[in-house]
Image: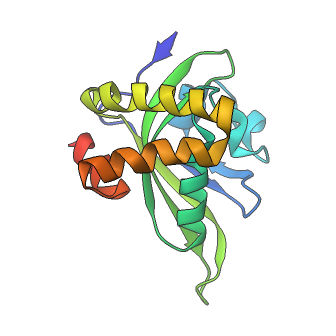
């Protein structure tokens, strides 16, 4: 079953440097169908959906570890096997000296029209990933960006509007 976020919902979570959840709000727990006790201390990928390309996560982690924020469409899987899409903004949490001490993510409801673009793209990326690996899957994305003459951020934020 596909679940949908409400228009005014915001899912918030924080992780440590190892990607373990150290904070999650009630909307996250409700959407993911986990209790706070089941989430705290667990790897954030506890909600990773098998239809989510690893290449997108590679881009996401490479970007935030470099200190930049990233936006991405992500499909998640709940404890009970349901799924839900989010439009995610992920940033590094910094200490007073500017060192990365963790990660902060806010997710909101994705534009349904954006999912009409993202869903087949991710499906194609997953197929390529299974046969040729993450780098080949990422090339599917970069080839589309080149074809459209836009950067990743420009494409992702433009289809969310």
Looking at this rendering, what residue extends furthest in the left direction? Answer: 161
Residue under the image location 58 percent in, 16 percent down = 82
How many callouts does the rendering have? 0
Locate residue 129, reporting x and y percent: 63, 35
Percent of width and height locating residue 62 = 59, 63
For image coordinates 20% across by 43% down, the residue present is 161
Seen from the viewer's position, the closer of residues 147 and 3 is 147
Q: Is residue 24 visible?
A: no
Indicate left or right for 127 with 34 as reference: left
**Coloration mode:** rainbow
Taking the spot 27% from the left edge, 56% from the top edge, the residue there is 150
Q: Quadrant of residue 81?
A: top right
Residue 86: x and y in percent read 44, 36
Near-viewer residue (122 or 63) = 122
Q: Is residue 136 left or right of residue 108?
A: right
Q: Residue furthest bottom?
A: 97
Residue 48 image point, x, y percent: 65, 34
- Residue 78 visible in the snapshot: yes
In this rendering, the answer to whether 103 lies above or below 123 is: below
The residue sitting at 64% across, 82% down in the picture is: 99
Q: Nearer the viewer, residue 92 or 66?
A: 66
């Amino acid at each position: 079953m596909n679940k949908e976020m409400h228009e005014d919902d915001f899912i918030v979570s924080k992780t440590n440097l190892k990607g373990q959840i150290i904070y999650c709000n009630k909307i996250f727990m409700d959407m993911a169908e986990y209790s706070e006790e089941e989430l705290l201390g667990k790897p954030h990928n506890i909600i990773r959906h098998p239809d989510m390309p690893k290449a997108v996560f590679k881009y996401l982690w490479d970007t935030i570890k470099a200190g930049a924020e990233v936006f991405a469409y992500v499909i998640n899987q709940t404890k009970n096997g349901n799924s839900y899409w989010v439009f995610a903004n992920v940033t590094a949490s910094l200490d007073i000296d500017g060192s990365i001490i963790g990660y902060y993510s806010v997710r909101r409801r994705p534009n349904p029209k954006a999912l009409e673009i993202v869903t087949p793209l991710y499906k194609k990326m997953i197929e390529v990933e299974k046969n040729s690996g993450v780098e080949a899957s990422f090339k599917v994305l970069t080839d589309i960006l080149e074809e459209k003459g836009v950067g990743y951020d420009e494409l992702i934020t433009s289809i969310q509007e």
